[in-house]
Structure formats: C-alpha cells, structure tokens
Image (cartoon, grey):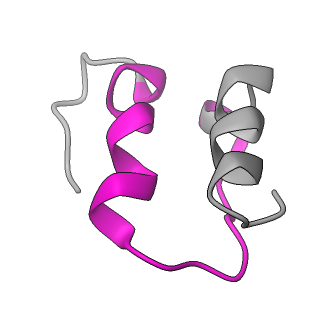
Amino acid sequence: MLTPGNVSDMKAAPELPERAGTMRYLLGDKGYHAERLRRLARDVGAPP
C-alpha cells in the first residue's frame, strides 16, 4: 500500500491487516509505532 508523502502512516494503518490477510508477524518502521496498531495486529493473531 502506498500513500502520499504528506499523509501520516497511521491514517492507512488500520487497513493493513485487512488487506494483508493472514499474517504471522507485523513488521513496520517507526512511522507505524503506535499502541493502536499493535492492538490491531494482536487482534488478527500477528504479534507485532
């Protein structure tokens, strides 16, 4: 998923687990470091 450079990574983050399908892990750079995204990952069974 690509977003414009002026859009926060966290705006697109909630869509990632939905688009990625089954995941074993969720890896992301510091732009995705937020408890909200960690919770989303755990909810789909992918430890952040």
- Residue 23 falls in which quadrant of the image? bottom right
Q: Is residue 8 above or below residue 2?
A: above
Q: Nearer the viewer, residue 31 or 12?
A: 12
Q: Is residue 6 left or right of residue 30?
A: left
Q: Position of residue 38 (x, y in %)?
A: 76, 39
Magenta residues, as a range? 9-31
**22 part of magenta stretch:** yes
Q: Quadrant of the N terminus?
A: bottom left
Q: Position of residue 16 (x, y in %)?
A: 39, 51
Residue under the point 83% across and 63% down: 47
Would you say the magenta stretch is mainly helix, strand or loop?
helix
Q: Is residue 36 above or below residue 1?
A: above
Q: Is residue 40 above or below residue 45?
A: above
Q: Position of residue 2 (x, y in %)?
A: 20, 51
**2 part of magenta stretch:** no
Q: Is residue 29 left or right of residue 35?
A: left
Residue under the point 61% across and 33% down: 31
Q: Position of residue 27 (x, y in %)?
A: 69, 64
- Residue 44 falls in which quadrant of the image? bottom right
Residue under the point 42% across and 33% down: 14
